[in-house]
Amino acid sequence: MLDKEPLQNKYSLVKGAARRARQLQSGAPALGVSDSSKACRVAQDEIRVGKVTYTVSAKLVRPTLL
């Protein structure tokens, strides 16, 4: 996450890191050096140093009933 972007909330950080961790487990290359070999920690490190960013949707999408 970039320093100029404030942390929206911890839930968003966890969701972003989980998505990136799944990409890493599926074979995506790591974008930086991490002390850990675990995908979840590598994803958190990538977000922390700004290699990976995520966006939080401002609009809630509600399902339509048929």
Image: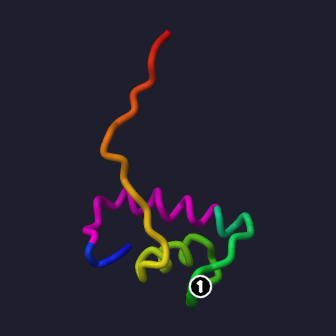
25 displayed left or right of 13: right
Residue lying furthest top: 66
Residue drawn where x is 56% and y is 86% of the image:
32
Residue drawn where x is 28% and y is 70% of the image:
5
Quadrant of the rendered structure where residue 23 is? bottom right
Residue drawn where x is 50% and y is 65% of the image:
17
Secondary element type, mark 1:
loop
24 displayed left or right of 1: right
Q: Is residue 10 above or below residue 4?
A: above
Locate residue 55, reporting x and y percent: 39, 57
Q: Is residue 47 above or below residue 15?
A: below
Q: Main secondary structure of the magenta part?
A: helix
Q: Residue 60 in magenta?
A: no
Instruction: Determine which residue is flagged by label 1.
Output: 36
Q: Is residue 23 above or below residue 51?
A: above
Residue lying furthest right: 27
Q: Is residue 22 above or below residue 46?
A: above
Q: Residue 12 in magenta?
A: yes
Locate residue 1, reporting x and y percent: 38, 73
Crowd tier of the residue under label 1, counting other residues whose Cα lies within 10 Å: few below 14, some 14–19, many 20 or above: few
Residue drawn where x is 63% and y is 76% of the image:
38
Quadrant of the rendered structure where residue 20 is? bottom right
Question: Where does the magenta region start and end?
Answer: 5-22
Locate residue 3, reporting x and y percent: 29, 78
Locate residue 19, reporting x and y percent: 56, 59
Q: Amino acid at mark 1?
A: Ser
